[in-house]
Amino acid sequence: MKNAKNLLALVLALVMCLALAVPAFADGPDWEAIDAMEYDDASDAIYDYNLGEFYAAYETAKAEVTDLNLRYALMAVAEAKMLESGVFMPIYGDGGAFAMNRAVPRSVTTTSWGLDEYKWYTALVCNEIIKTEDRDALTGIWGAAANADEWFEQAKAYLDEHGYTLRDEYNAHSSYDMETWDVIATSYTSDSYFIACTYTGLLEYDAKNVQQPALAESYEVSDDGTVYTFHIRPGVNWVDQQGTVIGEVTADDWVASLEHLADNNDELGYLMSADGGCGIKNYDAYVNGEVTFDEVGVKALDDYTLEYTLEAPFPPFTTMVGYGCFAPLNRDFYKSQGGTFSADGDEYTAGNYGTSPETIAYCGPYVVTNYTPQNIWTFSANPEYWNPDAIHVHTVNFYYNDGSDTMRAYNEAVDGTVNGCSFNASSLVQAKEDIPEGEEASYFDLYHYTTTNSATCYCAWLNINRAAFANFNDATQGVSPKADDEAAIAATREAMNNQHFRLALAYGFDRGAYNAVSVGEDLKYASLKNSYAPGDFATLTADVTTEINGESTTFPAGTYYGQVMQAQLDADGYPIQVWDPTADGGAGSGDGFDGWYNPENAQAELALAIEELAAEGVEVSAENPIQIDTFYFAGSETNTNTKQAYKKGIEQTLVDAEGNPLVVVNLIGFDDSTVMQYAYYRNSTGAEANFDISHSSGWGPDYGDPQTFLDTIQPYGYMTKNLGIY
């Protein structure tokens, strides 16, 4: 794989002149020509054919950095073009399920970007499960509170008045395995989720979602918006896993962090690039070997003064500093673990750093005191944390749960092993029957609430250039039933590069039925998402006039990002609803309804696809259906049934006049969920993606701008590997 960030500066020019380098593919991809290309060149050609219109619109949007309202409108137009391509479709977010819990709602920030929501230390956790009416009352108190301090004071008073007692532990389940403990070198949520509480950043969002000073006491921004000066809090210490002080936090820790990030640029380096993120001055030039590191825009002016310089203004810069790529790094400890910096002239290696909880330094609210993979992980309060009074729970435990026991989460929430649980189809039935001792109503009636849908969007990804027909790390795992059928493979690739076929799959996917398997009929729409970036992720603060298909259109102040997306989709004639102005009690939303599923539209798109594929020499019939592979965890009854629901829905919708399926879904089962991750999640390139359609990968925002979503779908973007390219 080429160094993606070295090439990003060339991508726009490449897209504009791609027709000079490869066939235009006006009548479909020329696979003979593509197969003769180098992998990245082939990816460029396939990307341009399927996503070129989106990328052109997106480059226009990213170029707008002075008028934020116009920028957001242009981003929404670009996302509409992306959704129209059908290379993936949104499914659901983290939320929209019935649940019960001992944790007080909104006692941890609900900011949807960065990693602050995973720090847990501000959580208020009760010994008793919180009743529905009390949860609602507490949420109302949160809304009325002027600031976080007032909120916590009033919440504690309410809990005491209503007979609740606080516990000093936060306990939950997790199905994750760790790849690394180096937060600067990972983009996996499954890693960051646990590392986030081991460090503190420059700024941090509080429980009222207001960004507050953390290890930076204050900061200033230059008049031209390119220089950020942070004043580091003195007297904060680094500790090792035993809590022994190993040094003071200084401005150089962020310089060391960026050096380390540049050395493993393929993970989070795109966020520093001028083309993919905030544009740290000379970051790209350093990665390309054009300048030395002392010319990069990060400086420790003294022990307590840190300066970042950007290539150009990037308004959401401060919203980025809570993410892992801006975590501090203790230079001496990193070196003590065998880590090196290429900026020092050494051959880069991370050595032993980040291989276990013992090999990282801590400056956050917790240190890891027990790490037993697939069993229990324990975090204990850091004795040197800079703000000890803010720590409400001094112990955090995660118990491994792979989901194979559908009742475990519920049973352990009832007995107090964990704070709470979401109800799946099985436990929902039980919760409606079980009555707590001393009560007259059921657990469900007493305690249930609906979890808030997060900004993270899990999607159905279509592999438009599949190269792997077994797991890349073990060819005996995940073997496709069509692995030796060249004709079937070729037909699927042609189909996946036909927009009408992709849209047939999208419109034929009954996401409500898919969700109902895990959350029940009552909530099958609650977590559904209809766009990649949430429709309410940005709101115009002033009137904006822009063109929608050449027609000047004014969007008034207060217009949501999703409303602009909808305007573009409507103008282009696509029957996709991404914004419902009547949803969420009339406030409007892009979540909570199915704006894609329509069997009639699916059949119409399939008919167009069959006609176009026939012109390419691909017959689609009952005798020669298109085969698409997807995977599931056989150890989970819920996951198995979910994929069965998908198979049934597609094969009953995309049919011929006699009802014979024209698309067949091959289900590939894995007995080990960790092994399954190498089919879709642990792959580093598109060539390693072992599926035709995946329903298991998602993206959450790294910072507070729609660019954080759309960047992942630009050439060499992080999520393009799910499309089988880059």
Image (spheres, helix red, strand yellow):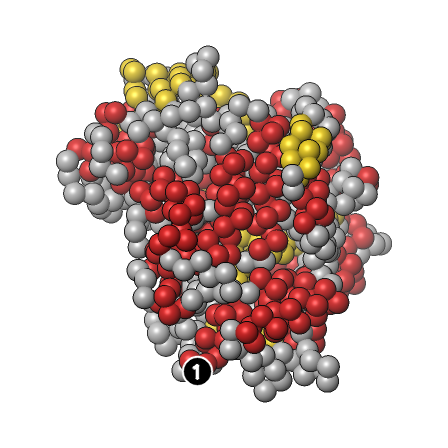
Residue 582 quadrant: top right
Question: Residue 474: image x %, image y %?
Answer: 34, 71
Report the residue that reaches farthest toward the bottom. Answer: 623
Looking at the picture, which amino acid does disc 1 mark? Asp
Q: Looking at this view, is 454 or 726 the one in front?
A: 726
Work out whether residue 127 can be spotted: no
Side of 428 relative to 367 (left or right): right
Judge whether 463 appears above or below 322 on screen: below
Q: Which residue is mark 1?
A: 485
Q: Count neighbours of disc 1 (C-alpha within 10 A) and say few if under 14, some if 14 to 19, many if 20 or more.
A: few
Work out whether residue 313 can be spotted: yes
Q: Quadrant of the N terminus?
A: bottom left
Q: Looking at this view, is 301 or 31 the one in front?
A: 31
Question: Residue 310: image x %, image y %?
Answer: 39, 25
Judge whether 149 appears above or below 279 on screen: above
Q: Looking at this view, is 199 or 369 the one in front?
A: 199
**Residue placed at 32% from the left, 25% from the top?**
297
Side of 642 relative to 326 (left or right): right
Q: Looking at this view, is 391 or 39 the one in front?
A: 39
Residue 251 quadrant: top left
Question: Residue 506: image x %, image y %?
Answer: 64, 62
**Residue placed at 48% from the left, 43% from the top?**
711
**Residue placed at 30% from the left, 20% from the top?**
300
Q: Quadrant of the C terminus?
A: bottom left
Question: Residue 308: image x %, image y %?
Answer: 37, 23
**Residue placed at 69% from the left, 20% from the top?**
146
